[in-house]
Image: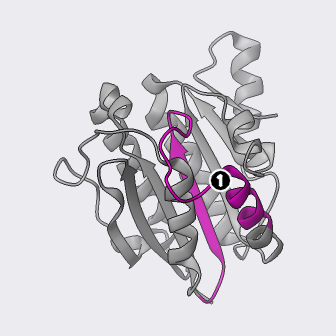
Amino acid sequence: MTTQIFLLLDMTSSMGRNKEGTMDACNEFIEGLGDNQRRGLQTDAVFTLSVFNSNIGLERVAREVPVERAPKIDHEHYDPAGATPLYDAIGQSIDLLESHVGPVMLVIQTDGEENSSQSVTRQDIVERVAEKTALGWQFVYLGCDIDAMEQGGNIGIPAGNTMSYNRANAKEAFADLATSSSQYLQHGSTSSKKFFPGAQAHRKKSRSTGNSRHTTSK
């Protein structure tokens, strides 16, 4: 069955502080997703990229395209503004994925806490994440300059599926995301509570040398 990889990308005003870096990092991830096919490793997967803020709600930039043909994000489709209706955006993303037949990986990226949702509560998200996790969905949480382990945990995402990173190191964090996503696909899109084992190992090594570039949950 076809795996759906859905990236929910924060496009709120605070993300404008590193707009170019975020775009480069996102495109690094998109390019990395297609590496399996370019290396001749067959993985049946499609990619959806969505952006969100309080001005536009949720908007799909790319919709269910084969990962090896996923388009890169550009200035036309990434213009940070507005506040953070995070719960609304996650709820809408899950709604859009309901009809997909096959494994689902939903990646949530944000640099701030919920502050403007109108229709979905934290408890709603906790319940829906639990429901979909039980059905085999993979949830991943990336926090830019925030504690992803705490924020992801608040909506029911296991610590091993969260990563915190510094804004200046977005590209490295998204490269780690691409690596873990490729491993997820190669292992049959089986959900796990330890999505980032490679990144965790890197963190331990970096800390031992005093040159940690980003923080991954324990």
Residue located 66% across and 35% down the image: 148
Residue located 59% across and 27% down the image: 146
The image quadrant where one finds the C terminus is top right
40 left or right of 199 in image? left
Above or below, 127 relative to 44: above
Which range is magenta?
A: 101-130
Above or below, 26 relative to 37: above
| Membership of 103 in magenta stretch | yes
Above or below, 183 relative to 197: below
According to the image, label 1 marks what residue? Answer: 140
Is residue 70 at least partly visible in the picture? no
109 left or right of 81 in image? right
Q: Secondary structure at mark 1?
A: strand
User: Where in the figure is residue 159, as x and y percent of width and height?
Assistant: 79, 42
Query: Hey, which quadrant is residue 66 in on the image?
Result: bottom left
User: Where in the figure is residue 166, as x and y percent of width and height?
Assistant: 52, 24
- Please tell me which residue lies in front, 154 or 2: 154
Please identify the residue farthest to the front as the structure is shown.
118
Is residue 218 at least partly visible in the picture? yes
User: Where in the figure is residue 96, as x and y percent of width and height?
Assistant: 50, 76
Q: Residues within 10 Å of mark 1 (few under 14, many from 20)?
A: many
Above or below, 87 relative to 115: below
70 left or right of 34 in image? left
| Membership of 218 in magenta stretch | no
191 left or right of 74 in image? right
- Please tell me which residue lies in front, 81 or 69: 81
Q: Colour mode? A: one colour
Please identify the residue farthest to the top as the structure is shown.
210
Query: Hey, which quadrant is residue 207 in on the image?
Result: top right
User: Where in the figure is residue 178, as x and y percent of width and height?
Assistant: 54, 53
What amino acid is found at the position of numbered circle 1 in the picture? Answer: Val
Residue located 63% across and 73% down the image: 104
